[in-house]
Image (cartoon, rainbow, N blue to C red):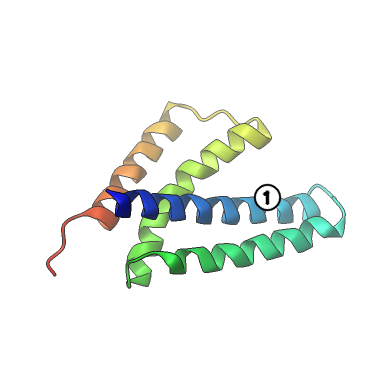
């Protein structure tokens, strides 16, 4: 159970770094915020590139495939908290399907 919690924590941190860094870049380039937003965004995005390497799985493709589902859910949450976006039922159903996929991809039983 500790391994599952650790994996989900790392996925969450990676998601916050990717979405937060992308949001900062968006603020700089699209919302005309000052250049430090872009610099900070670039640094946070660099952290996003590092965090998934801390997963226990040695398989890059599996880590990033599972992370994709977490990213979708976190994107909807970020949109609600920072941009006032309200997910509709289809967004929520799609996100639930993605989380099911995360479970199957990353936590499904494997032959050793």
- Residue furthest to the right in view is 34
Q: How many labels does the image show?
A: 1
Which residue is pictured at 69% across the width and 65% down the height?
A: 43
35 in relation to 72, above or below: below
Q: Mark 1 points at which residue?
A: 23
Mark 1 nearby-residue class (10 Å; few <14, some 14–19, many ≥20) = some
| Residue 64 placement (x, y as % from top left) | 41, 63
- Residue 38 is left or right of residue 76, and the answer is right
Residue sitting at x 45%, y 55%: 10
Local secondary structure at mark 1 = helix
x, y (%) of residue 12?
48, 49
Rendered image quadrant of residue 11: bottom left
* Residue 93 falls left or right of residue 47: left
Q: Residue at x 62, y 33 (%)?
A: 81
89 relative to 82, above or below: above
Asked whether, in this view, residue 75 is left or right of residue 109, the answer is right
Q: Nearer the viewer, residue 7 or 74?
A: 7
Query: In the figure, is residue 87 to the left or right of 79?
Result: left
Q: Position of residue 94 (x, y in %)?
A: 38, 38
Check the image and name the residue furthest to the front. Answer: 2
Q: Position of residue 27 (x, y in %)?
A: 76, 49
Q: In which quarter of the image is the C terminus?
A: bottom left
Residue in the foreground of this view, choosing between 109 and 104: 109
Residue sitting farthest toward the left: 111
- Displayed quadrant of residue 84: top right
């Amino acid at each position: 159970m500790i391994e599952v919690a650790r994996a989900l924590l790392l996925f969450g941190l990676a998601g916050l770094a990717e979405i937060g860094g992308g949001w900062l870049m968006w603020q700089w380039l699209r919302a005309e915020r000052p250049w430090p937003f872009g610099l900070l965004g670039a640094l946070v995005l660099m952290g996003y590139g590092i965090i998934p390497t801390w997963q226990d799985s040695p398989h890059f493709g599996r880590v990033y495939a599972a992370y994709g589902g977490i990213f979708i859910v976190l994107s909807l949450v970020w949109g609600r908290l920072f941009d006032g976006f309200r997910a509709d039922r289809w967004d929520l159903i799609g996100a639930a399907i993605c989380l099911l996929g995360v479970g199957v991809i990353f936590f499904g039983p494997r032959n050793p």
